[in-house]
Image: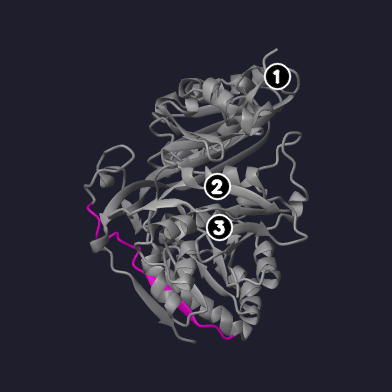
Amino acid sequence: MTVRALRIGGGAGFAGDRLPPAVDLVERGELDYLVLECLAERTIALGQQRRLADPELGYDHLLDKRMRLLLEPLVRTGTRLLGNFGAANPLGGARRVQRCAAELGVPVRVAAVLGDDVLAEIDPAAPAWEDGRPLDEHGELVSANAYLGIDALLPALASDADVIVCGRVADPSLFLAPMAHHFGWRPDDHGRLASGTTIGHLLECGPQVTGGYFADPPYKHVPNLARLGYPLAEVCADGTAVVTKLPGTGGRVDRMTVGEQLGYEVIDPTGYRTPDVVADFTTVQFEEVGADRVRIGPTAGRTRPDELKVSVGYRAGFRCEAEISYAGSTAVARARLAGEVVAERLAGTGLRLAVSLIGVDALHGPGPGAAGRPYEVRLRVASVGAGRELVETVGEEVTALYTSGPAGGAGVRVHTEEVIGVVSTSIPRAAIRTEVVPVGAT
Amino acid sequence: MSRRLLELAHARAGDKGNLVTVVLIPYDPADYPLLCARVSPDRVRRQLGGRALGGVVRHEMPNIPALLFVCERAAGDTVTVSTSLDAHAKSVSSLLLELPI
């Protein structure tokens, strides 16, 4: 008798991902688990801001929308949901899921995983990984979240919860946890944990493994990109898997898409560190075993790190970005002049300005694009500074270019926002206390 | 006539705090040794210019096959506090692919 593979869908690769493909995965994917990864580095710190304003908030701002689309099909198909959409407030997020379920008349059991918030535990004078300076020297600290691993999620999976809401968890662990739970992998089974981590890493960015972030015609074509399907993995008990997508969806899954995603955001391919294992990505082999089906072979692994990474959010001041467009064969010259004028008018403020021309050098500086003479060009002036009022003067001076700048300026847009910076540190595992809290129906 | 890297290989950039990573994969695995020989960390650092002011480390992944470049960004040019239009530096994959080979 063959054991059925465990089917896990990757329904979101970031907070802004599309929602319908996740619903499609639940409806047609015969999934055991749907995983939603919704947290970038800064998202928790921004959630923390919302929570400070209202203690009930701080979870993913699209939570209601996600639940309204997903809860009914999840329950109807018997698919469990696991995701970090609790962000800065997993308990609040879990309660909100329960409320959505009640409104929809869908019976679900919801649990929150707590313990990633370590703001009270970290040493504010500890050096940041990035620059060695004390954490609190960067600015007022507003959040500190440890990257939890599968050991925090397994008790929730062992409970009867249909929906598991967590905050900061290492992205691959969101996928590895259902595998370890289902197959009973032990914490010292480094090979299987590393293999499952590879699968999690491939799925954690959702459609980036199924043809998203990939099209580059005429070199790289993606069929039906508009109807891009999101990924699912068919995982075997030995930790190997087939990564694929639903029939009839757009996109592609092959050695090229899988290869790009394996190397995505990897610092050391021989030692990819998560809270669960250290995986050696140079040991995994891919094999195309069918249309849009890639078999992921085993990955070698080593003992997990003793310490957990912590993302620390701090107040980094305010950022103003202001833009104005120029057109015509002399557009570049007028846009440059406008930039010089703004810089001279702001010279006394002490603000450090980033002045660039969109269409020429805004992305890569004086690189291959800088020699071009586009017909349309957009001046961009940006600055980060300590005070909102001071930084807003950048937008005021760019706006004033309408009457007080070169000829033909058009289309001014100004955006000012508070900046939450993020630096990293680590914390011993022993300092972490995780907890699973079932949320009763209300 | 010199070719550009984009005719031989594809790439994806990712961000990690003050680092930007770029994975470079030959369309034809037979070109992997050529990439190893021609796309040195030093050439990558020069090509990325202001987006990688620190060092560039190259990792080899012959199993894909792929080269992985881990590039250090300028102080103050990290994802969260950058003033660049592309705060994540994710567009540098396209810059790398313009490299003449």
Residue at numbered disc 1: A373
Residue at numbered disc 2: A285
Q: Could you say whether the residue bearing mark 2 is in a helix, strand or loop? A: loop
Res A243 visible: yes
Q: Is residue A29 above or below residue A386?
A: below
The 10 Å Cα crowd at callout 3, few under 14, some 14 to 19, many 20 or more, is some
Colouring rule applied to residues: one colour
The kind of residue on which mark 3 rests is: Ala
Q: Of callouts 2 and 3, which one flags the residue occurring earlier in the amino acid sequence?
A: 3
Asked if residue A49 lies left or right of residue A406, the reply is left
The residue stretch that appears in magenta: A107-123
- The mark lying in front, picked from 2 and 3, is 2
Res A395 visible: no
Q: Could you say whether the residue bearing mark 1 is in a helix, strand or loop? A: loop
- Subunit of mark 3? A
Q: Is residue A368 above or below residue A396?
A: above
Q: Could you say whether the residue bearing mark 3 is in a helix, strand or loop? A: loop
The 10 Å Cα crowd at callout 2, few under 14, some 14 to 19, many 20 or more, is some
The kind of residue on which mark 2 rests is: Gln
Q: Which mark is residue A15?
A: 3
Q: Is residue A305 above or below residue A371?
A: below
Residue A129: percent from left, percent from top: 31, 42
Pointers 3 and 1 within a single chain = yes
Q: Residue furthest front?
A: A1
The kind of residue on which mark 1 rests is: Arg
